[in-house]
Amino acid sequence: MSETVNIKYGDTSLDLPVITGTENEKAIDISKLRASTNGLVTIDVGYKNTGSTTSAITFLDGEKGILRYRGYPIEQLAKDADFLEVAYLLINGELPSQNDFDTFKSDISLHTLVHEDLKHFFTAYPLNAHPMGMLCSLICSLSAYYPDSLDPNRSDAEKNLTVVRLLAKMPTLISWIQKKSTGHPIVYPDNKLGYVANFLRMFFGQRTDEYFTDDVLVDAMDTLLILHGDHEQNCSTSTVRIVGSAHAPLYASIAAGISALWGPRHGGANQAVIEMLQAIHNDGGNIDKFIDRAKDKSDPFRLMGFGHRVYKNFDPRAKIIKVKADEVLDKLGIDDPLLEIAKKLEEIALKDEYFVKRNLYPNVDFYSGIIYKAMGFPTDMFTVLFALGRLPGWIAQHREMMEAGQPIGRPRQIYTGSNERDYVAINKR
Ligand code: CMC
């Protein structure tokens, strides 16, 4: 017999159905609540208790530190899979056969070039423009070159082409953003190379020299992209879904996701972590002082890279990244004092009652910045790299939302402003 939750409101008694997911997660289905109770709605600021959708893409259990894409544990994917394989998995629901994977990769290679006219955008940006602002506008602007893609309800072939274009062109655009900041000429894609190697060559290479990709760096970057691939209904993904639910073009929905990701409480934390570690270093390495500041409620400072809305035990991505950070720094022979500060900070915070009581653990962004820094990425590029990793997740979630025929996202509110009052002429106020 299906479970229900009974609620009583005035004279109304209502049995609300409980829906159960494949991992036995349960939710009260309130879709008939308002109609059955003459206007009663629920309120849950920040959606701490509210599921916005059912989804078959990512499962995570924050208490147990579990993360799986389409059922596959993140640890296995990070160790054995390749980023484009994971992208295929997220978007299509299954791991590709060799044949399907070859076609997917060659389709992406075919679309790595970006319309030359898009270069003109860069003359308008100042040298110190933040890469996230540029990425957001460039991705939205891609829609201008593909008018057939504006309607997200088009044919499957056209929908797939938009997905391939996004995956193929994002690395090229990111490397153009980098070249703008250094004033160097752009490096065109080399389609003989794999996705990550090609990106690193366009980003770090110069037209004047041959660029040799380093397998250690390609592997580290590939792992980081996989770890960021999807994370169920987080702030940017929910944004992609809600913008997409208005049937805006996919390019616009992804651009909205990029905007949400920019914030330091979300993807922007990887940049903020390095800035914080640098500030601790510059201040003479007094970690306790910064821990005290994080605990002080009158100080807006928070330990960046600590805490997570859903992980209340540990973030499985942080565990993998911590090991990778050691590997990369070791192999590159880099002795980064910030890594030492990060490790000490983690050690102290994990024993501190304030952090223990609130279940605050290092999250994915605590160590990712250390790796990006060691690889030579500028700090303000870190969130852009997060966006590149999250792109397949956003696409998968958008596709799932469209295929489910989800109605437009439109929450209710409880109005707390003035009751009706008469307009007062300006000379009488
Ligand atoms: N430093 C100090 N105190 C913290 C921190 C922190 N990093 N994070 C949470 N708290 C405290 C917070 O002040 C509150 O204390 P109290 O109960 O006394 O009021 C309590 O812990 C619960 O925090 P919250 O803000 O209600 O929790 P939330 O679920 O709304 O926020 C968070 C989650 C990630 C926004 C928050 O932990 C935070 O701001 N962390 C730092 C930024 C960061 O690293 N973000 C990256 C998240 S991982 C990447 C991604 O997936 O986006």
Image (cartoon, helix red, strand yellow):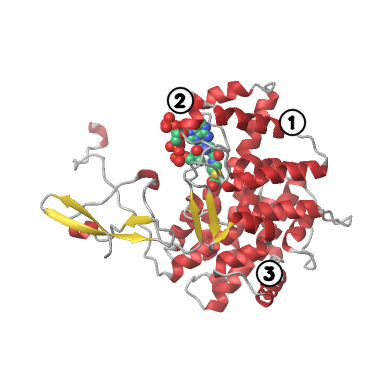
The kind of residue on which mark 1 rests is Pro
Q: Is residue 264 visible?
A: no
Name the quarter where the C terminus is drawn.
top left
Q: CA distance from mark 2 to mark 3?
A: 49 Å
Name the quarter where the N terminus is drawn.
bottom left
- Mark number displayed over residue 297: 2
Q: Earlier in the sequence, mark 2 or mark 3?
A: 3
Q: Earlier in the sequence, mark 1 or mark 3?
A: 3
Badge 2 residue CB within 8 Å of ligand 1: yes
Q: CA distance from mark 1 to mark 3?
A: 39 Å
255 lies above or below 309: below
Question: Residue at the right extreme?
Answer: 209
Report x, y in % for residue 37. 18, 55
- Label 1 belongs to which residue? 337
- Mark number displayed over residue 108: 3
Q: Nearer the viewer, residue 100 or 301?
A: 100
Crowdedness of circle 1 by 10 Å Cα count: few (<14), some, many (20+)? few
Residue at image point 52% right, 41% down: 265
Question: Residue at the left extreme?
Answer: 11
Q: Does the residue at mark 2 contact the one at mark 1 (Cβ under 8 Å)?
A: no
**Left or right: 257, with 46 as reference point:** right
Report x, y in % for residue 347. 62, 30
The kind of residue on which mark 3 rests is Ile
